[in-house]
Amino acid sequence: MNTTFTLPIPSRRGFLTRAVVTAASGAVAATMLPTTLRGQVPVIPTELDVLQFALGLEHLEAAYYVQGVPRYAAADFTNAPFAAILGTKLTGKVLDNLKAIRDHEVAHVTALQAAIRGLGGVPVAACNYTFSYTNVSDFLLTAAILENTGVMAYDGAVQYLVTPALLTAGASIATVEARHASFLNLITDAIPFPASFDSAKTVDEIKAATAQFIASCPAPGPDTGAGGGTKAVAGPKNLMSPVNQVALDGSGSTSGDGKPLTYLWAVTQGIASISFPATAKPDVQLQGGFGTYEFQLTVTDSAGATSTDKASIQFTGR
């Protein structure tokens, strides 16, 4: 018998007041999230189960922002209908904040993969996702769904972590997800902090709530990322530049599964802007004056394996 799980989400002008998905549709998500039930007998998840569960969610969130953020410019948010209510001072920073959220989610994926490998596991691969939005308002509402779902998922799963380092890491990710949710609640005209206590949801409830975004998931396979098959190669290294506009180059990166890579560049030192950070060879504008700038490249293959590398530039002036 199919059952339903109703997830309250932020709304604006009556759009998408709740997401209702059937638990049966969560079957396609089974390879993404471990289950706490085998038949009808409750099973206490291991720490490795919890980390795999969290990684599945972070894959989903990272994919949403990596795919969606490059589609928009800052003006898309300042010209959106909600800008008239919130004002351009707040909406003018929306794109920058979304880029920061994207980078956080990618960092969460990398950290969880490392933790899973440290426990002797093979990190669960990313699925193929489907996201439906036609404008910036829809994009932000869907982002709010994902972030609020993430908070409820971590709140429900963190109880199964007993190793102090893992418990601290899980809690630190949960609080960051809560900050993401608060920001997105605010700009989608919902209360940033709607209750005294956040709700904790079970694995099965989260699977049901996220099933609407999952098209298919790959079968479990070898850990291509652990063996270095997928490798990020970021350039230039220690470049001395007399000009403040330089091209980065990640085209030397390799894919462990032979399929095209997904690229994501981020600034890790200095003040700089990156044009088209989801490409192999973006241009950067060095905006913080003379000194050293550092950039991190994260590549992801079709199996979800990731690798990072850094490029560095010293702006010397003429």
Image (cartoon, rainbow, N blue to C red):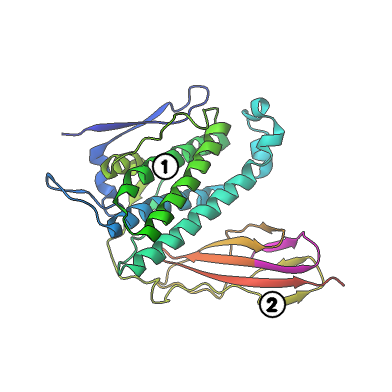
Percent coordinates x, y for residue 193 in the rendering: 50, 32
Label for residue 8? none
In the image, what residue occupies the spot 59% across and 71% down?
310
Tell me the kind of residue under disc 1.
Val
The extreme top residue here reads 14
Lower sequence index among marks 1 and 2: 1
Tell me the kind of residue under disc 2.
Asn
Circle nearer the viewer, 1 or 2: 1
Percent coordinates x, y for residue 112 in the rendering: 40, 60
Can you identify the residue that label 1 sits on? Answer: 151
In the image, what residue occupies the spot 54% across and 49% down?
101
In the image, what residue occupies the spot 52% across and 26% down?
12
Residue 10's place in the image compared with 56, above or below, is above
Quadrant of the drawing holding the N terminus: top left
Nearer to the camera, 117 or 87: 117
Nearer to the camera, 314 or 70: 314
Which of the 4 image quadrants contains residue 85?
Answer: top right
Can you identify the residue that label 2 sits on? Answer: 238
Q: Which residues are magenta?
A: 281-294
Percent coordinates x, y for residue 6 in the rendering: 32, 30
